[in-house]
Amino acid sequence: MKKFIAGAAIALVAMTTSAAAEGHGDFPERPVMLMVSYGAGGATDFQARIVTMTAGNDDALGMPVAIINKPGAGGRVGWNWLATQADADGYTLGAYNVPHFIAQSIKGGVEYSTDSFEPIANWGADPAVFVVGADSDFNSMADVIAYATANPGGLTFSGAGLFVGHHIAALQLEKAAGVKLAYIPNKSGGSGAMRAVIAGEVLGGVNNLSDAFRAREAGTVKILGVFDTARNSFMEDVPTMAEQGYDIDNASVNFRGVMVPKGTPQSVIDHLAATVPAMFENSRVASRMKAGGSPMNIMNRDEVLEMWAARQITLEALLSGL
C-alpha cells in the first residue's frame, strides 16, 4: 500500500511538472529583467522605468521588472547580448528602439536583425529634434543650414550613436538641405549627447523630443525643429522640418517597446503580449510619461510586427546609397 501511494505521488509530481513545463506554469513566477541598451538617465532608460513601474500589480505581470543597462556602440552591445547570450525563457526582456536596431542590422557588423527577436508591445514614439544651447546664435533651422553651407563639414552636432534615430535624422537633413554636416556620435548615448550641447562642446545636436523637453524646461537648450510629419503636442511652438522647407518625413521617429529573444516559448510570448499593453495603459504610467514630456504610442504585438516590416523597407531605401 505504501509503495502504491509513493508511486502515485511520484506520478502526480511528474504529471504536474510536465503540465507546468508545457504551459509554463503561472508565468512569471519570479521577477523579470528588462535590458536597456542605453545608459541610465537617457530617454529609453527614463521611460522604461516608468512604463514598468506597475508590473508587480495583479492586473499586470504580478512580478516586478528590474531594469538592467547594457550601453555601448549606439545600442549594439545590449542587442548583441540579447540576441546571442540571453536566456529565451521570458524572464529576460529587451527594450527595442526603432529605427536603431533595424538600421544597424541593415548596415551590418552586428549579430541581430528583426528575425532575432519577437516583439511584445510598443509604448512610445519619440521624434528627433534639433537642439542648440540656450545662448546659441542659431534661432532657426535656416540659421543652422546657412552656417553649414558657409562652413562645409564645420557644423558639429551630437547624437546618441551611429545608425540610431538621431543619425537617420542627420542623414535626412544632409540630403534635404544639400549640405555636409559633422555628426558626432556620443559614447554615453542620448544623455551624453545632450550634455555636449549644453556644455558648448558642439554647435548643436539631434536628440529625443523627450530629453529635449526636459532640457528646455530647465532653460538649457533651444529646440529649432522636429523630424516628424506634424508638430508635437508637447511643444506645439516648434515647427517641423518640412514646415521650414526641408523634405523630411518621420523615418527617424524613435519607437520604443519590449521584445524577447527568438526561441522564447510561444505560450510565454502570448501571455506577455496579452498583459504588457494593459500595463502601459495604466493611468499612473500615462501621467508620469506626460509629466516627463514622453509621447506614448501603445501598439500590440501584431501592430509592432507591421511597424517593424514597414521600417525595414523604408530604411533599406534610405541607407542603400551609404
Image: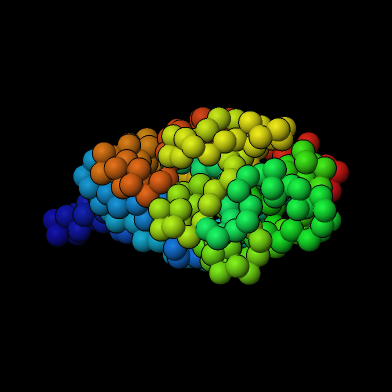
The residue closer to the viewer here, 281 or 306, is 281
Quadrant where the N terminus lies? Answer: bottom left
The residue closer to the viewer here, 131 or 31, is 131
Residue 134 vs 149, above or below: the answer is: below
x and y percentages locating residue 109 in the rendered image: 75, 59
Identify the residue at horizontal 40%, vertical 53% (top origin): 217
The residue closer to the viewer here, 302 or 236, is 236
Quarter of image, res 187: bottom right
x and y percentages locating residue 129 in the rendered image: 58, 46
Residue 40 vs 310, above or below: the answer is: below
Which residue of the protein is positioned furthest toward the left in this rendering? 1
Residue 81 vs 55, above or below: the answer is: below
x and y percentages locating residue 219 in the rendered image: 44, 57
Identify the residue at horizontal 60%, vertical 30% (top origin): 229
Residue 214 showing in the rendered view:
no
Identify the residue at horizontal 49%, vertical 52% (top origin): 212
**In this rendering, position of residue 232 left or right of residue 317:** left
Identify the residue at horizontal 22%, vertical 47% (top origin): 57
**In this rendering, position of residue 158 left or right of residue 296:** right
Residue 163 showing in the rendered view:
yes
**In this rendering, position of residue 50 left or right of residue 69:** left
Q: How many marks?
A: 0
Coloration mode: rainbow
x and y percentages locating residue 72 in the rendered image: 60, 67
